[in-house]
Image (cartoon, rainbow, N blue to C red):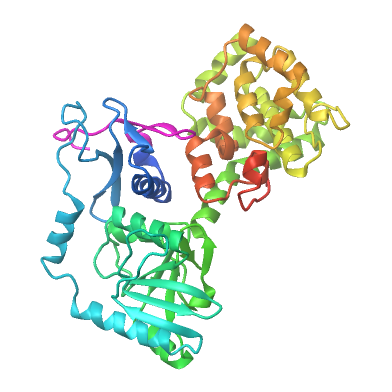
Amino acid sequence: MGSHQRTILIADFEMPRGAVDIEQLMSMPRAGWEHLRAQINVRRRQDRSKPIAKCRLCEGSVFIRAQATEDSHVPMYAHYPEASKDCPWYEGNNLHPDDARAAQYQGHQESALHRRLCSTIEQLVKADPRCTGTTVNTYLRSEIHKRGRWPDVYAELLGLGRFALEVQLSKPFAPEIAARHLHYDAEGIALVWIFSTLEDPMPQGFHDVVAMQRGNAFVFDDEAEAASIERGTLVLKCFMENGEGGWRESKLIVLDDLQTGVGRSAFVEDCRSEALKLRCKQDRSRWWDAMKKAREERPNSPEYSEHYEDAWADMKAGVPGLWEWERDFWTERSNRARAHTAMLYAILCSVAHSADAGRPVLHITKFSGDSAVLSMLNSKLNGTDFKHCASLIELFVRATPLSDLLEKVSLKRIIAEAKKTDVQINNAHPLWLVMARLFPEVLDGLVRAELADLGQLPRWASTRSEIQIYNLGTAE
């Protein structure tokens, strides 16, 4: 960020995301801020009066602008055009999408290469014996009484569905990408963006398309055209993200290989969701392995086992203020911070695994029977050690299928007493930040919201109503 240019320093997002400052935004993985960027544009198309993100100072709607660097892009906040020019963080006028589009095309709306590719793709789709109709750059009337669209290629295939094939040679604009996905999703038409080549580095508009297609990029080149002629149907080359900033080896796919019934996207594999879920489990898996070994070594006091040392050292290196809290905790509570953290991890693991299994699965205390989880929570929160964690534990339980436990008279009373008699840790406290790294599906608002947007919240981190909506996974 150059000192010559003002920028929005904090954006307040709709919960559960909450406040996200510019440093946090810029440190996010590309997949994370691209998802935020897409959701902001989708919401603006759906309901401009209810923006996902607002400027902390003027409360005007903001979006995420991708600033090009030498070999990549950096996310920055920017006000929408209607924002107050008096905001101290106002960064100047943004080019209107229509003006940007006119500048990009320089008055020419379609190139000869674009026309050739659209015509070729239409002929190849038409060669499929299941094809019942195609059009090229023809107005497609809406079936829900709204404005229609002009898809590059529209095709209907018997038993497979309807497809809008958009051939993209120049970078598309984020608002238009969101608008097209919303439109075709409402119409029950699968939208597939097709590139002629995979540029390196890619323009941000292409990245926005890949984000919508869950980490998949589809290319129609000479190899795909030859394979299409040989097979008698449209064949595309599919590139899928490898989770490390690159691509797996490409593969040739047909329209039958696409998943088209999941939200607004068409893709072969949901690379974005799988990579996010893997990141969620990485730290937790290390602590889970440490806990299992610790229980074998010291069944009566596993939290004091040295098996936690490596995982704890990693946390101290990555969580701001954790080593200071560890130093102060001994003075304040005469206990080891690492052991205290291991016990809190065991409590939350017990809640998560019980919620996932639909029966009590405890990793701390020896309560048994149907009310074992309630007894565990009452016991731990009624003692002095975890009173300061009552708000965290309450929030955690409320986000699981076990949320009904919070209506039990005994637990309600104990939580209320804990909040009254002990200062609660909040989401900026080092201990909370550790738990957020171990259980981001619940305690990291950005991660929880992204998983919810993608319909990928695991069962243990979903309320009962959410379980009926999402395609759910398990706690490990």
| Image quarter in which the N terminus is found | top left
Residue 240 showing in the rendered view: yes
Residue drawn at (30%, 54%), measured in percent from left and top? 174
Vertical comparison of 198 with 283: above or below: below
Vertical comparison of 15 with 271: above or below: above
Q: Is residue 247 magenta?
A: no
Occupied quadrant, residue 110: bottom left
Furthest residue toward front: 145
Residue drawn at (17%, 33%), measured in percent from left and top? 3
Q: x, y percentage for residue 267?
A: 48, 66
Q: x, y percentage for residue 256?
A: 53, 77
Residue drawn at (59%, 46%), measured in percent from left and top? 457
Vertical comparison of 416 with 306: above or below: above
Region of the chain picked out in magenta, as a range: 1-24
Residue drawn at (73%, 43%), measured in percent from left and top? 356
Q: x, y percentage for residue 316?
A: 53, 30
Foreground pick, 461 / 287: 461
Q: x, y percentage for residue 83?
A: 22, 34
Foreground pick, 234 / 34: 234
Foreground pick, 385 / 32: 32
Vertical comparison of 339 with 206: above or below: above
| Number of marks drawn | 0
Occupied quadrant, residue 307: top right
Furthest residue toward top: 421
Residue 245 showing in the rendered view: no
Image position of 328 (left or right of 2): right
Image position of 167 (left or right of 441): left
